[in-house]
Amino acid sequence: MAKLGRNERCPCGSGRKVNRCCGQSRGPSAEDRAWLFLRDQARKFAPVLRDYDEFEIAQLLDRVIELPVRHLSLQVRLPALWRPELERLRAVMVAGNDLVDVVEDATAAIDGPLVRVSLALAAGELCQRDELDVESVAVITVDLARPTSVFVSASLIAATAVALGRCPTPAGLVIAAR
């Protein structure tokens, strides 16, 4: 089938030109909208952390990076097909070696604004159900809005550990390793 020209009528039957109808995405992309949402949420939660000094915020961050082990909704969704970076992370976890060298590459392989928005929304939902305090949600949200996020890495490590049977789910079940 030949490509439609920009001045031809759209095949959907609207009578409009192709460049003004179907197939033309208008406005910001889904990724741009996700980044805007994250920045807006970070601005909303930043006042919660205003009275905390750097040390207290670091302590809060240390506390929240353990949350994905206790809440499955705070774990990233692992893809069905693992990219090489994720395979290296899996191999290192199976071998029981130090994760420091591989976690950055593995995080970069799955990280993106849509992943971060899903984590921020999950944290907000846990807060609404009184399973997380507002300070924890604030730290998570502000961290997710930063260019590099510690929480995404912690979430990936927890999700991989659960998938490999190295860590029990919050209900205490151990998943059979792949």
Image (cartoon, grey):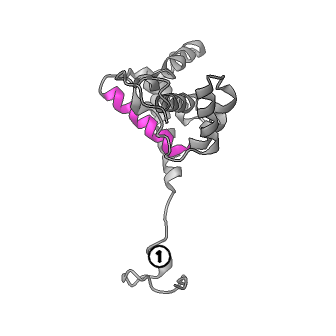
Total numbered labels placed on residues in the image = 1
Mark 1, other Cα within 10 Å: few <14 / some 14–19 / many ≥20: some
Give how far across and how far down residue 92 sits, in percent.
63, 29
The residue identified by callout 1 is 20
Residue farthest along the left direction in this orientation: 129
Residue 101 is situated, as x and y percent measured from the top left of the image, at 70, 29
Q: Which residues are magenta?
A: 112-128
Q: Secondary structure at mark 1?
A: helix
* Name of the residue lying farthest toward the right: 101
Q: Give the left or right position of residue 83, taking residue 160 as reference.
A: right
Residue type, label 1: Arg
In this rendering, is residue 85 above or below 8?
above
Q: Is residue 25 above or below residue 47?
A: below
- Inspect the magenta stretch and tell me whether residue 126 lies in it: yes
Task: Tell me where residue 73 sits by quadrant.
Answer: top left
Q: Is residue 51 magenta?
A: no
Compared across the picture, whether 2 is left or right of 16 comes to right
